[in-house]
Image: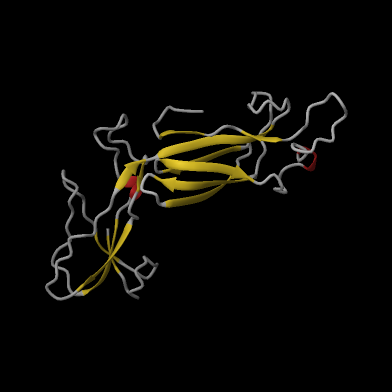
Amino acid sequence: MLYYDVDGNGVIDVIDPILDVATTGPNGLYLFDNLPPGTYLAKAEEQQVPAPPSSAVSGTLGVMVSTTGTEAPVNLAAGQAYLAADFGFIEAAEVKGSVFHDVDSNGVKSPSEPGLPSITVVLTGTDINNNPVSLVYTTTATGAYEFIVPPGTYTITYDTADPQIPADLTAETTPTQPAGQPPRGPGIDRPRLWPRQSGQGR
């Protein structure tokens, strides 16, 4: 999509009208021509980019993430042609897991162990292009969390002092249980990273 950047700030705002929409050809090229001088913004809709033919889910929408950003500011002078408003995408990876009450303290979530809702989980790391990535997710009613990210190297953390964790589950490293009983504490399910394909689960 091509927007006119009314205030010239390089960001799509509510005041910026859509001037035109183009669809890429077989080689990925697109073109907006016969434009007057001015400030513009080209935008690629991430959720409209299909998975490539080499993917196991070729043609599927909603599985690609940007490697370049999805907006490109363009400042055109009279008679100028700008041919570098390019957008890169890669098939996304998915990180899933859960924060739960680890009743038996074995580090593995059992079906009977309840999840902890409303816990803030943080993903940090770098993608395959060494770009820093930092995302935050609040666990669902079942304690589940999910991140959709470019392939890369990431760390998942959560704060044991989170006020949403019940007070009696914070004794994981300094147990105060009666002798012979295991410490009670929250656990975090081991996250796994895989290409985001339909039909996969933890």
Q: Is residue 36 above or below residue 110?
A: below
Q: Which residue corresponds to the image point at 60% horizontal and 32% vertical from the top-left?
A: 189
**Which corner quadrant of the image does residue 142 belong to?**
top right
Q: Which residue corresponds to the image point at 67% horizontal and 38% vertical from the top-left?
A: 116
In which quadrant is the N terminus drawn?
Answer: bottom left
Q: Which residue corresponds to the image point at 21% horizontal and 50% vertical from the top-left?
A: 23
In the image, is 1 to the left or to the right of 26? right
Q: In this view, which residue lies farthest toward the right?
A: 178
In the image, is 74 to the left or to the right of 33? right
Q: Is residue 40 above or below residue 115?
A: below
Q: Position of residue 20 (x, y in %)?
A: 23, 61
Number of numbered discs visible in the structure rendering? 0
Q: Nearer the viewer, residue 109 or 61?
A: 109
Q: Nearer the viewer, residue 28 or 149?
A: 149
In the image, is 175 to the left or to the right of 72? right
Q: Position of residue 156 (x, y in %)?
A: 55, 42
Q: Is residue 38 above or below residue 179?
A: below
Q: Which residue corresponds to the image point at 48% horizontal and 28% vertical from the top-left?
A: 201
Q: Position of residue 186 (x, y in %)?
A: 70, 36
Q: How is the image coloured?
A: secondary structure
**Which corner quadrant of the image does residue 117 belong to?**
top right
Q: Position of residue 193 (x, y in %)?
A: 46, 34
